Image (tube, rainbow, N blue to C red):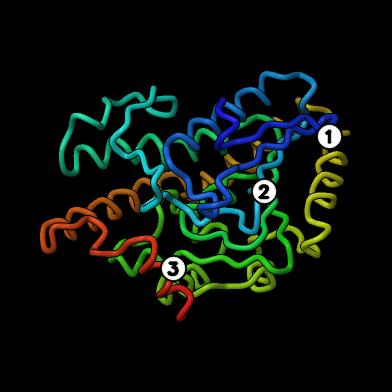
Amino acid sequence: MSDDVVRYERRGPVALVTMNRPEYRNAQNSAMTYALDEAFTRAVDDAGVKVIVLAGAGKHFSAGHDIGTPGRDVDKSFENKAVLWWDHVDKAGGDQRFARESEVYLGMCRRWREIPKPTLASVQGACIAGALMLAWVCDMIIASDDAFFADPVVRMGIPGVEYFAHPWVLGPRAAKEVLFTGERFSAQQAKEWGMLNRIVPRADLEAETLALAEKIAEMPPFGLALTKKAVNQAEDLMGMRSGMDSAFGLHHLAHAHNAEVGGDSLAGQDARSMRDANKAS
């Protein structure tokens, strides 16, 4: 695992996994995706780890998918871990994008959702677009009082990020408001909608998250694993998995439409334009 993009620490029974690209607001490239997967695998394989905490170094949890940093690596091959599909690098058009996003976005998030140990997201500052996916796959989310959230990708003509959990974690009405407007929403609003478990002062975020993780770690591991599976199965019985499959198809239709009418699958948007529009909202 590369310490350049992800840090791994043991804090007693807790594994602390920290995204470590603070200079780019922890934008998630493929290298980070696979480093996260390696860290989570390490934590699952360590019998001494009872709970996993996901955090982001620096001012922000994460700005989401990397669509513009010098470390963007969409043309680089990695060994597939989430889906059994061909490599995307030597493919073109929708074939390329579907292969890559099935693996590194939707596939990885589904893989991490099924981690048999409780996972807690510790969120401060920005949690935007693809970063929502990272937080949403965790079993609980603890946010600082200055955290803010948004999924502004409808500005690209795309119906939300690839791991389309919005109706389940926000409720249908709030999901539509978040997506239709693309506006930021606060930790307080997220808590009201049921997306967050706790809001704590920024200075106390790590300590409060670790304290909760240690309390959960006192429960029997197999009981925690079965309880997590039971709740996840209930969500899937409410249509979460099949709903995501449907939304993923619409997501790729939107990319293809953008490329067909404008020659750019992101509808001319980049990291700066999305950030500026989000600030303006």
Please tell me how crowded label 1 is: few (under 14), some (14-19), or many (20+) other residues with Cα within 10 Å: many
What's the distance in space between the residues labelled 1 and 2, CA to CA?
15 Å
Using the image as rendered, state which of residue 206 and residue 120 is in the foreground: 206
Please tell me how crowded label 2 is: few (under 14), some (14-19), or many (20+) other residues with Cα within 10 Å: many
Task: Say which mark, if any, is on residue 217.
Answer: 1
Q: Return the residue at label 2.
A: 121
What's the distance in space between the residues labelled 3 and 1, CA to CA?
38 Å
Using the image as rendered, state which of residue 151 and residue 22 is in the foreground: 22
Q: Amino acid at mark 1?
A: Ala
Q: Quadrant of residue 80?
A: top left
State left or right for residue 135 relative to residue 10: left
Q: Return the residue at label 3.
A: 275
Classify the position of the N terminus by image quarter: top right
State left or right for residue 130 relative to residue 36: left
Question: Is residue 15 depicted above or below 18 in this figure?
Answer: above
State left or right for residue 227 relative to residue 204: left
- Viewer can see residue 216: yes
Q: Earlier in the sequence, mark 1 or mark 2?
A: 2
Choose mark 3 or mark 2, whichever is in front: 3
- Viewer can see residue 106: no
Question: Is residue 175 depicted above or below 232 in this figure?
Answer: below
Q: Secondary structure at mark 3?
A: helix
Q: Earlier in the sequence, mark 3 or mark 2?
A: 2
Choose mark 1 or mark 2, whichever is in front: 2
| Residue with the most extreme bottom position | 280
